[in-house]
Image (spheres, helix red, strand yellow):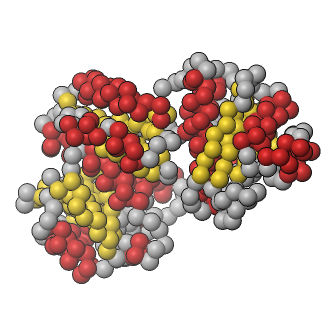
Amino acid sequence: MNAEIIAVGSELLLGQIANTNAKFISSQLSELGINVYYHTVVGDNEARLLEAIRIAEQRADLIIFSGGLGPTKDDLTKETIAKHLNRNLVFDETALYAIEEFFSKQKRPMTENNRKQALVLEDCDVLLNQHGMAPGMFLSENDRIYILLPGPPKELEPMFQYETKPKLAALLHDGGVILSHVLRFYGIGEAELEHRIQKILDEQTNPTVAPLASDGEVMLRITAKAQNEQQAFRLIELKKREILDIVGEYFYGVNDESLGFNLVQMLLENELTISAAESLTAGLFQSELAEIPGVASALIGGVVTYTKETKIEQLGISADLLEEYGIVSSECAAAMATKVREKFHTDIGIGLTGAAGPGSHDGLPAGAIWVGISICDLEPFTYRLQLTGSRNTNRIRAVKFTFSYLMRELAKQGYKKLI
């Protein structure tokens, strides 16, 4: 089955909002084995939407529309499709009741145009909207499937996940299931990871393995087809072990987990405390950790020591050491990590120093970064990074690399890893 996604809304063409729905729907369809060959964006204009539909029908078996199901005059998706397919629009009583209940609870009058949202294509399968008013629609006609979804992502995503996707899976796979599992890696590039697992990629059948890249990290999505979830899960686990035997040192989590989340869980599980001394990241390391619920049991505190003077005054680093090696150096990062650990009486100390950019710093080029890690009474570990990117991109990536390096070092020292 080949699909085309048509996003409806002039605000998309004006650049007022990003078309995140197309990205989400494409990722979901790929898990079902459905090819997406075209993304189309069209404004709130009946003639242009009709033209887009006719073009899509020439090249797709499945056409998915997002947006244009609301109460206003420029919401014209279902009206245009009804006209094109010569279908009537009828009121869905369940949707109409839900809309009336919403206004009743809000103690607000319901205008007549809000009733419009309960109109659906005659004889379609109605897709419930648990997070908004306009229902979605699933219609088969002339060997084609038309799916209409609301525009707001908070409405579209659950509607697709829980209403639409099972219908498509049942059509495609005779009641079987498709299960996907995402493995997340950091510290290795997409090309290098693909090179290392090339044999697996070349020989894949079921499950399939698809590399993905995002925000400096790499993901592998494993998708298995089977008669039930247990069988699919077993297929995924076998493939996962095969992959991790090759690139397991860079693996940090699964599905929606983040580096920060997994690091915090590791700290909590092992009852470890942490503090940080930050130069180029200026508190970003601690800020990223602070987003994770429960981190208060692990994150004790830290300091921002942006200048040479504050490194001496706040941390007690020797002026001679800084004079000899410079503030962007392995020695400085190690000293920062050790001193902050001692200052805050934590199990782990982190030191981050470097040249964020765009210019050089302390004689080193932009993107030159040193990470220091001090764990209990062990000799501190240091890592050298040479990043390329904007100033803030380098700062964010430095934090992510530090999360990754710390989890790796803790695992080497025998601390329990949760994955």
Q: Is residue 175 visible?
A: yes
Residue 349 picture location, percent across and down: 74, 33
**Left or right: 349, with 14 as reference point:** right
Which sits in the foreground, 395 or 110? 395
Q: Is residue 117 visible?
A: no
Residue 254 picture location, percent across and down: 44, 35
- Find the residue positioned furthest to the right: 313
**Left or right: 234, with 407 as reference point:** left
Q: Residue at x 39, y 68 (%)?
A: 71
Q: Residue at x 27, y 48 (%)?
A: 30
- Find the residue positioned furthest to the left: 142
Is residue 250 depicted above or below 192 in this figure?
above
**Left or right: 299, with 94 as reference point:** right
Which sits in the foreground, 267 or 388? 388
Q: Residue at x 37, y 53 (%)?
A: 24
Residue 363 picture location, percent across and down: 73, 58
Residue 32 picture location, percent across and down: 23, 44
